[in-house]
Structures are given as structure tokens and as C-alpha cells.
Amino acid sequence: MRRLSILFAITLTGCVTVESTQNPGSSASPKERAEARIELGIGYLNQGNMVKARENLEKALTHYPGYYRAQLSMAHYFEKVGEKDAATEIYETALKQHPQNGNVLNNYGTFLCKHGNYERADKFFNKAIDQPYYYLTSASYENAAFCALKSGDTAQAKTYFMRTLDHDPHRARALLHLAKLEIEDGDFVKARIRLMKFHQRYGVQKTSLELLAELEAKAGNEALEEKYRQKIKQMS
């Protein structure tokens, strides 16, 4: 049996977002000044200008000490430059100051999972999910699912992907990964329905066709498998 030719990247994402902010004047609040520096810092980070990124993110913390978004951005910077201990220290400070902030809990879970601390990461993802007024529940379930996959717990990953889609049916990565797991488990009917819904929502994609071809190969439907493989060739 041919293996899936597609490579599924396990990518966990934190929730450090950048809001569009004008550079505020001296009358701006500490939070507004911090936000402006965060925007600049993340922008420089994305451009690879680490010196300017650190300078602006440190100024954000100076403008508004203890601001969780500035802390998360600074921790993200330290992760990017490979300073694990410094990132850990920032995260732990943020957790002490904001123990019920879903964004802090989620991002720390992401950090832990990246460094192989899967069980502890799972606890923090679930803590984030349990917080009232935390509206990124689907993102935390998806992160928990990818972390479970990374740890080799496919059953738990499947459950988390289903919970992700319960909270946000439009998360395409979760839908495709769940279909892949269903195919591996022999749940062909569920996987077919899921992939057809994907086509209705996003159109026919090479990724989804490869999954359908693998599904029909495992189900013994050679004609349908060949049909999908021909379509894949046409898209290449």
C-alpha cells in the first residue's frame, strides 16, 4: 500500500498578535505606547532585524511593566534567538502575574510542547480552554491536538481535533488532520464526508485529493483511487 505522499507539518501557534497602532504621542497611555513598540518589535522580528526587535520589545515593557502582550512578545523574541532559559523566565513571570490569562497559558503550553514537555503542555492548553472570557478556545484545542500528535498519542489528537472543529468548523488544518487520522483508523465514511465538506468550503485541493486517493486505496476502490490520482497529476 502506498503511503501518503503529503507531509503534514505539526505547527503549534501562540497568540501573540499585532494590532494596527499609530505611533502615539506623549499624551498616549502607557498601554498605547507599549502596543506601538510591540508592533514595531514584531515587525522587526519578522524582518530578521533582531537588534531593533529587542530594543522595541524592551521599550514596550518599560512603558507598561507587567503587560502580558509585551511579555509574550519578549518571550517570543527569546525563542526566536534560541535563548530558551530567558524565554522560560519571561513566561514564568507572566504566569505569576497573569495566572488566569488564557493567552499566557496557551503560549506557555506551546513553548513547553516545542521543547518536548508534552504532559505539562497539555495541562496548560486545557487551563487556557477552561478560562472564562477566553475566546481562542479552538486555537488551544488545535495546539493541544498537534502536541498530542507530536507525542505519539493519536487517539488524544483525534479527540482534540474534533473539539477544535466543534468550536470552529472553518479550521482547515484541523479538518485535514482529523480526516487523515480517520483514514488511518479505517473510519472511511467519516473521512469521506469530512473531505467532501472541505471541498465544498475551500474547493478541490491537492492535499485533500491525496487523502482521498489514500482512503480509496485502503478501502480497495481502485477505480476511485485512480480517478483522484489522475486529478492530482493534472494539478501538478
Image (spheres, rainbow, N blue to C red):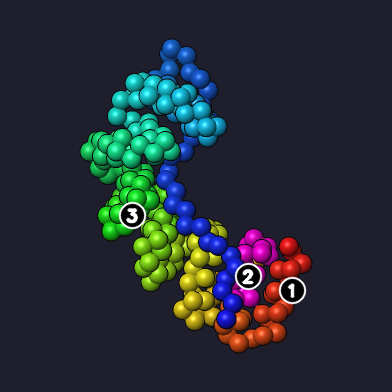
Q: Looking at this view, is 195 or 207 the one in front?
A: 207
Which quadrant of the figure has residue 220? Answer: bottom right
Q: Secondary structure at mark 3?
A: loop
Residue 55: x and y in percent read 42, 22
Q: Amino acid at mark 2?
A: Glu
Q: Residue at x 55, y 59 (%)?
A: 172
Q: Which residues are magenta?
A: 201-214
Q: Is residue 61 magenta?
A: no
Residue 210, label in figure: 2
Question: What residue does disc 3 label?
Answer: 116
Q: Is residue 137 left or right of residue 225?
A: left
Numbered marks: total = 3
Residue 65: x and y in percent read 30, 25
Quadrant that contains the C terminus: bottom right
Q: Is residue 19 left or right of residue 5?
A: left
Q: Amino acid at mark 1?
A: Gln
Q: Residues within 10 Å of mark 3 (few under 14, many from 20)?
A: few
Q: Is residue 196 left or right of residue 168?
A: right
Q: Looking at this view, is 200 or 58 the one in front?
A: 58
Residue 230, label in figure: 1
